[in-house]
Amino acid sequence: MRIRVIVPITSPDFNEMCSIEAKTFLSDEAEVDVVSLTHGPASIESYYDEILAAPHIVEAVQKAEDDGIEGVFITCFGDPGVDAARELVDIPVVGGFQPAVSLALTLGDRFGIVTVLDNVVPMIHDLVAKMGVTSRMASVRVIDKIGRAHV
């Protein structure tokens, strides 16, 4: 099996770390490669950043399929470009949000989300609503720069 991890930002700084982490979850027979975007934002911290990244994410997913890759993981909790990419390719495409919330729902009746930026809280609420699990979300908490949680 060939898996491609797409880091949806223009910096390759996280690629090696993502490769090491991905390999801990795969069998020895599985191959994984990690790529970052050649164009797009330096980070995804808002709807605007997500919109800037999405076309390049979709392009990278299409290239993955053309390269014979059998599945793609987009390393962003906001799932940018996931739905659009799924429309265009015949391989599985997942982001960080849906799998994490789906797993959380198997472990308990309610779940919470911890994030690092206030401005992504509305995006998280929208993703939760899109999945239809708003009634099962306990809270979204933001960790500030000195490690304190607030609502």
Image (cartoon, rainbow, N blue to C red):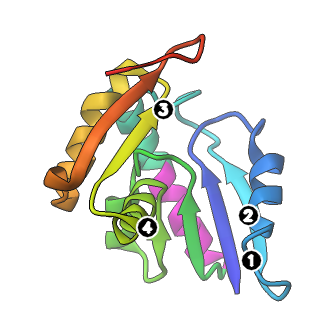
Where disc 2 sits, the SS reads helix
Where disc 1 sits, the SS reads loop
Which residue is under mark 1? 26
Which residue is under mark 4? 103
Residue 45 in which image quadrant = top left
Q: CA distance from mark 1 to mark 4?
A: 18 Å
| Badge 4 amino acid | Leu
Q: Is residue 105 left or right of residue 26?
A: left
| Badge 1 amino acid | Leu
Q: Which residue is outermost to the top?
A: 146
Q: Which residues are magenta?
A: 57-67
Which callout, 2 or 4, points at the residue further toward the start of the chain? 2
Question: Disc 2, disc 3: CB below 8 Å?
Answer: no
Residue 29 in which image quadrant = bottom right
Which residue is under mark 2? 22
Which residue is under mark 3? 44
Q: CA distance from mark 2 to mark 3?
A: 21 Å
Q: Assign the N terminus to one quadrant of the image.
A: bottom right
The label nearer to you, 1 versus 3, is 1
Question: Disc 1, disc 3: CB below 8 Å?
Answer: no
Question: Disc 1, disc 4: CB below 8 Å?
Answer: no
The label nearer to you, 2 versus 4, is 4
Question: Disc 2, disc 1: CB below 8 Å?
Answer: yes
Q: CA distance from mark 1 to mark 3?
A: 27 Å
Where disc 3 sits, the SS reads loop
